[in-house]
Image: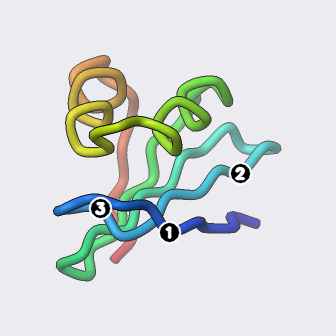
Amino acid sequence: MMDYVNVKSSTVAAVGYDETAGALGVQFLNGSEYHYFAVPRALFDGLRSASSVGRYLNKFIKDAGYRVKRVR
């Protein structure tokens, strides 16, 4: 089960983490949602508290090559 928390961002609405699956969920303001897999909890914590959520997401999640699936 993934619980989402709202974040302040010009592109990201909310982020969530499923501890058992090690999955990071990202809900975008445009309505799309992606799950990134095998992401360490520390990266979720960093994303949630980043001064720029979008920049952190790009640098540490997207550019790092985690497996991703669009779910919405």
Give coordinates of residue 29: x percent, y percent. Answer: 24, 75
- Measured in 3D between alpha carbons, the distance from the residue under mark 2 to the one under mark 1, in whole angstroms, is 16 Å
Quarter of the figure that contains the C terminus: bottom left
**Marker disc for residue 18:** 2
- Disc 1 packing (10 Å; few <14; some 14–19; many ≥20): few
Residue at image position (72%, 44%) is 21
Q: Amino acid at mark 2?
A: Asp
- Disc 2 packing (10 Å; few <14; some 14–19; many ≥20): some
- Measured in 3D between alpha carbons, the distance from the residue under mark 2 to the one under mark 3, in whole angstroms, is 18 Å
Depicted 26 relative to depicted 71: above or below: above
Of residues 29 and 50, the one drawn nearer to the viewer in this rendering: 50
Give coordinates of residue 60: x percent, y percent. Answer: 34, 22
- SS for dot 2: strand
**Marker disc for residue 43:** none
Quarter of the figure that contains the N terminus: bottom right
**Marker disc for residue 12:** 3
Residue at image position (31%, 17%) is 64
Give coordinates of residue 43: x percent, y percent. Answer: 54, 27
Farthest right residue in view: 20
Colouring: rainbow
Give coordinates of residue 13: x percent, y percent. Answer: 36, 70
Q: Is residue 71 left or right of residue 2?
A: left
Q: Amino acid at mark 1?
A: Asn
- SS for dot 3: strand
Name the residue that disc number 1 marks: 6
Depicted 64 relative to depicted 14: above or below: above
